[in-house]
Image (cartoon, coloured by chain):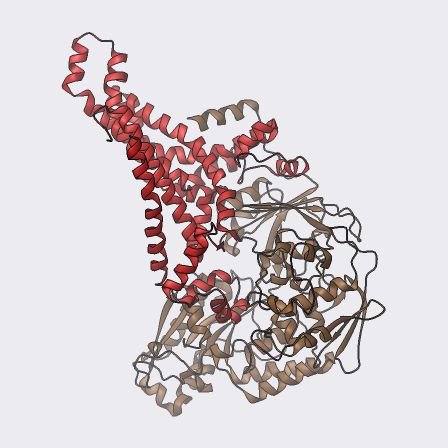
Chain colours: A red, B brown
């Protein structure tokens, strides 16, 4: 197991190198002018576009551009992101905790709703509950995230006023934080507020998380629900389940211990994809709710052809992917005794 | 699940979300804020904050875009030859750092702008006035330290003296630009910015100040100082030692909210005092919403034109490249009859009705009507198919009417107004003669930039927003053969050049007015451009906010058109 872990972790730098090379390579398809536009906000600034290109070395050959990027990257400097108007490393430091916070808060309901409702729907196949779950899946699965997000925003914030508006904090608490700053130990605002004992800010952050979390839960739990349900149904029709029932084991034990544990295998894979997606920033949800995570930054970097930004975002996503995959494989070994990594 | 549970909890607690506190101004916009260093400020998002954190020597008087008054300067004199400006500076002014404001700060500021003059900044037009070239020392080796130091210096009485190589009637207006705000010399040097000496100036030439240390830790003399800045918010608080007294609004919050639907909801709920609303169609959603005030019919301070390139550089757009009905020659628009025909083929009223929803004005020249020098009495083109036909028949000695043409006109992909304008033109031109064809090509902005900068495209629609409130900034840009837009239009007319050069050399306002009137008349005759009608602007804000209408000036970068210190709730 340890050897496996080390092997996997050693492959990470190689993955990152290949990925950065691929991105710089792909960006060569853009003209220097197209990449220089990231540095221009208005018509007036175009008068000096050629100077910008020269200064930023955008007209240099491929290997020169990549070489200088790599040299700096190895020193821990990933360049300056035009999309955030900050160095890439600072941007990630500033925004990743917010994304992590959102991911943590969203993973729980997503997995709960998906797995719990999926199991229940399978056990009560063809009852009203199963039908309702199926309708939910069809709707949630087919409504795009941005429609769902805006719909929830308009209904719960606009009409009903049950949830607060965009951002992480209401105005009075933004001012509160200036007058009484709280130490940012984790970068996650809710956790920091809790550690500082500032309940007002803590509740405000939680309130502001309701709608983004609800959006992510609705959209992401549907797939999870679908897979849990079908995998559960498949397992329930297996011979060993009938054997277990024949032995006179109580339903609860059969369903949850014998059946669900086996049904969870495909669900783990899917859940890990979901978590991966959340950690790489929920691009659309973050944009709609003006949530300061890395997703909205990545989207912005892409639209601006912000090369260091795109690189930073992609590398971060790659690191997350490799690590989440690793955790998934370990989970597999724990759930399925047949899996061994020697 | 959890979300629903929390929602129920909130419902049970009966919480109402509080609106913005009365001592706070909250604005939501989609644009990020690139910099808080005046030396790199050249976009409205940065300008909106810079103009409130720092101060310029002069500023616009009330709502006027043609009259200026002192801000950090209390008075000034201009020498008889128009080359020496001497500013008496305000006393008893403090920077946010606590340092007193002196002439040295002003001297340092302008020298820093001339030394760095980075390609992203607006300092090219300061350099044009003070050094006679828009370049920095890296591009123009003739720029020496001596030239920079001589151009701006403090005299013994502590007054700031500018010495220009030749008169520039627009110089004062240039000083009102947010990018020419005064920075705190001692503070900037302590942060590691340029030390202001001859010894080090060379290493700062062309330096991009966008992400400077000063941008991260600004110190100005403005009524507000930076309190906090994170991924999506910038918070300013009132500066208690501001020389003009304490403002009523104590906190200003700028929140970046990219999604328009979200911003509109927040505005309706009163969670934002104002938001970037986007174009006019959005107004329908906001009319009649309780608690909102709409200020409409705001004069437009930009000018937009359809360019007719007289020397098309990219053969890709020419089809056959000949007058044979399968394309156009590179000099297609060099014939004034073609340009006039197109001018008569554009339906101005329909554009105002369909694109601007009835809120627009026809322009006699490519200059905002609020600017000094604009003459509303000059003739304009109208939609007139008969006249258009007559001019097409005259073009190229009558040959064009016989053969017809295929013209490729470009517009920026996704730019709805530009697309509609081109569609109107296409429909009207094709109606005149079955052999006339106009093909519309949508291009991404970056491609269009490259091609139009080098004069590659035959026809394109572009606008210009003012750097400073002087007619020269528009008229020279569009009509002079050295103007910024010349490569895109190749509009070269010796008469226009002469008039514009004369106007640049004259400091007498009345004389300039006459000259600009002649520019307008001549521009009508040579018909280099189709003047696109200008849409009137509007702003929507919370009715509790006072001080917007009586102060609104379109030259300000921020949404409210005035300093935040003039607002209250």
Residue B355, position as x, y percentages in the image: 48, 62
Residue B137, position as x, y percentages in the image: 60, 74
Looking at this view, name the residue that lies furthest to the top: A248
Task: Please name the residue shown 19% across and 11% down the image.
Answer: A245
Looking at this view, name the residue that lies furthest to the left: A239
Q: State whether residue A16 is above or below residue A256.
A: below
Asked whether residue B421 is in view, the answer is: yes
Residue A190, position as x, y percentages in the image: 54, 31
Looking at this view, name the residue that lies furthest to the bottom: B397
Task: Give the position of the N terminus of chain B as an image quadrant.
Answer: top left
Judge left or right: residue A277 versus residue B67. Answer: left
Query: Considering depth in this image, is B285 or B190 the residue closer to the camera?
Result: B190
- The number of numbered badges drawn on the structure is 0
Q: To which quarter of the image does residue B421 belong?
A: bottom left
Judge left or right: residue B229 versus residue B305. Answer: right
Asked whether residue B562 is in view, the answer is: no
Query: Considering depth in this image, is B31 or B543 the residue closer to the camera?
Result: B31
Looking at this view, name the residue that lies furthest to the front: A3
Judge left or right: residue B30 versus residue B316. Answer: right
Q: To which quarter of the image does residue A323 belong?
A: top left
Residue A40, position as x, y percentages in the image: 51, 63
Query: Considering depth in this image, is B201 or A236 the residue closer to the camera?
Result: B201
Judge left or right: residue A249 versus residue B103. Answer: left
Query: Considering depth in this image, is A188 or A255 the residue closer to the camera?
Result: A188
């Amino acid at each position: 197991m340890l050897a496996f872990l080390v092997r996997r972790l050693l492959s990470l730098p190689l993955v990152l190198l290949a990925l950065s090379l691929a991105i710089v390579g792909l960006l060569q398809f853009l003209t220097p002018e197209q990449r220089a536009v990231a540095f221009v906000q208005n018509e007036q600034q175009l008068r000096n576009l050629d100077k910008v290109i020269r200064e930023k070395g955008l007209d240099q050959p491929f290997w020169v551009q990549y070489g200088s990027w790599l040299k700096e990257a190895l020193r821990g400097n990933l360049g300056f992101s035009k999309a955030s108007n900050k160095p890439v490393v600072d941007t990630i430091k500033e925004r990743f905790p917010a994304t992590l916070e959102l991911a943590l808060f969203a993973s729980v309901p997503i997995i709960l709703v998906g797995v719990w409702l999926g199991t229940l729907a399978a056990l009560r196949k063809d009852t009203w509950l199963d039908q309702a779950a199926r309708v939910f899946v069809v709707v949630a699965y087919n409504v795009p995230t941005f429609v769902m997000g805006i719909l929830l925003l308009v209904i719960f914030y606009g009409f009903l006023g049950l949830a607060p508006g965009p951002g992480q904090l209401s105005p009075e608490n933004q001012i509160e934080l200036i007058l009484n700053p709280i130490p940012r130990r984790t970068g996650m605002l809710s956790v920091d507020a809790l550690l500082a004992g500032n309940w007002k800010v803590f509740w405000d952050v939680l309130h502001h998380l309701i709608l983004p979390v609800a959006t992510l839960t609705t959209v992401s739990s549907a797939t999870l629900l679908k897979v849990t349900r079908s995998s559960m149904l498949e397992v329930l029709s297996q011979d060993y389940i009938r054997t277990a029932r024949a032995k006179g084991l109580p339903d609860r034990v059969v369903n949850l211990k014998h059946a669900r544990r086996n049904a969870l295998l495909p669900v783990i894979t899917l859940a890990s994809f979901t978590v991966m997606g959340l950690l790489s920033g929920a691009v659309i949800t973050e944009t709609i709710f003006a949530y300061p995570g890395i997703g909205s930054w990545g989207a912005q970097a892409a639209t601006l052809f912000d090369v260091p930004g795109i690189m930073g975002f992609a590398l971060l996503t790659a690191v997350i992917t490799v690590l989440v995959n690793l955790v998934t494989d370990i989970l597999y070994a724990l759930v399925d005794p047949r899996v061994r990594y020697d | 699940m959890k979300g629903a549970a929390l929602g129920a909890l909130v419902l049970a607690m009966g919480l109402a979300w509080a609106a913005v506190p009365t001592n706070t101004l909250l604005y939501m916009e989609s644009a990020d804020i690139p910099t808080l260093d005046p030396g790199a400020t050249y976009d409205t998002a940065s300008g909106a904050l810079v103009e409130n954190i720092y101060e310029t020597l002069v500023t616009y008087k009330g709502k006027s875009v043609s009259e200026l008054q002192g801000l950090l300067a209390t008075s000034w004199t201009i020498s008889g030859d128009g080359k020496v400006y001497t500013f008496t500076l305000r006393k008893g002014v403090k920077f946010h750092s606590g340092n007193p404001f002196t002439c040295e700060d002003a001297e340092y500021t302008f020298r820093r702008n001339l030394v760095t003059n980075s390609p992203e900044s607006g300092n090219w037009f300061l350099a044009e006035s003070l050094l006679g070239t828009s370049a920095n020392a890296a591009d123009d080796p003739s720029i020496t330290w001596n030239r920079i130091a001589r151009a701006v210096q403090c005299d013994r009485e502590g007054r700031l003296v500018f010495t220009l190589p030749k008169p520039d009637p627009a110089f004062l207006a240039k000083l009102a630009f947010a990018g020419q705000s005064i920075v705190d010399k001692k503070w900037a040097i302590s942060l590691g910015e340029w030390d202001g000496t001859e010894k080090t100036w060379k290493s700062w030439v062309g330096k991009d100040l966008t992400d400077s240390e000063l941008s991260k830790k600004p110190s100005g003399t403005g009524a507000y100082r930076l309190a906090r800045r994170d991924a999506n918010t910038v918070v300013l608080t009132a500066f208690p030692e501001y020389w003009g007294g304490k403002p009523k609004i104590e906190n200003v919050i700028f929140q970046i909210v990219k999604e328009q639907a979200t911003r509109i909801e927040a505005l309706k709920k009163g969670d934002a005092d104002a938001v970037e609303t986007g174009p006019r169609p959005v107004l329908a959603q906001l009319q009649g919403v309780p608690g909102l005030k709409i200020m409409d019919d705001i004069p437009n301070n930009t000018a937009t034109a359809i360019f007719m390139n007289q020397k098309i550089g990219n053969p890709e757009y020419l089809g056959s490249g000949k007058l044979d009905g399968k394309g156009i020659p590179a000099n297609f628009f060099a014939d004034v009859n073609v340009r006039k025909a197109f001018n008569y083929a554009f339906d101005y009223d329909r554009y105002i009705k369909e694109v601007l929803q009835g809120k627009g004005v026809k322009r006699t020249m490519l200059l905002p009507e609020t600017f000094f020098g604009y003459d509303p009495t000059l003739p304009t083109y109208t939609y007139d198919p008969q006249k258009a036909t007559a001019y097409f028949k005259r073009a190229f000695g009558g040959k064009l009417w016989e053969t017809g043409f295929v013209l490729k006109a470009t517009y920026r992909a996704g730019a709805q107004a530009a697309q509609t304008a081109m569609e109107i033109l296409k429909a009207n031109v094709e109606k005149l003669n079955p052999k006339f064809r106009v093909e519309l090509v949508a291009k991404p902005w970056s491609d269009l930039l490259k091609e139009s900068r080098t004069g590659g495209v035959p026809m394109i629609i572009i606008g210009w927003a003012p750097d400073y409130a002087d007619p020269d900034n528009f008229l020279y840009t569009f009509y002079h053969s050295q103007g910024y837009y010349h490569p895109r239009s190749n509009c070269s007319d010796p008469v226009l050049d002469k008039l514009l050069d004369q106007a640049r050399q004259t400091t007498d306002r009345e004389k300039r007015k006459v000259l600009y009137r002649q520019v307008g008349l001549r521009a009508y005759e040579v018909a280099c451009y189709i003047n696109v009608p200008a849409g009137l602007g509007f702003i929507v804000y919370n009715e509790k906010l006072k001080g917007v209408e009586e102060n609104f000036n379109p030259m300000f970068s921020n949404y409210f058109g005035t300093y935040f210190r003039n607002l209250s709730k």
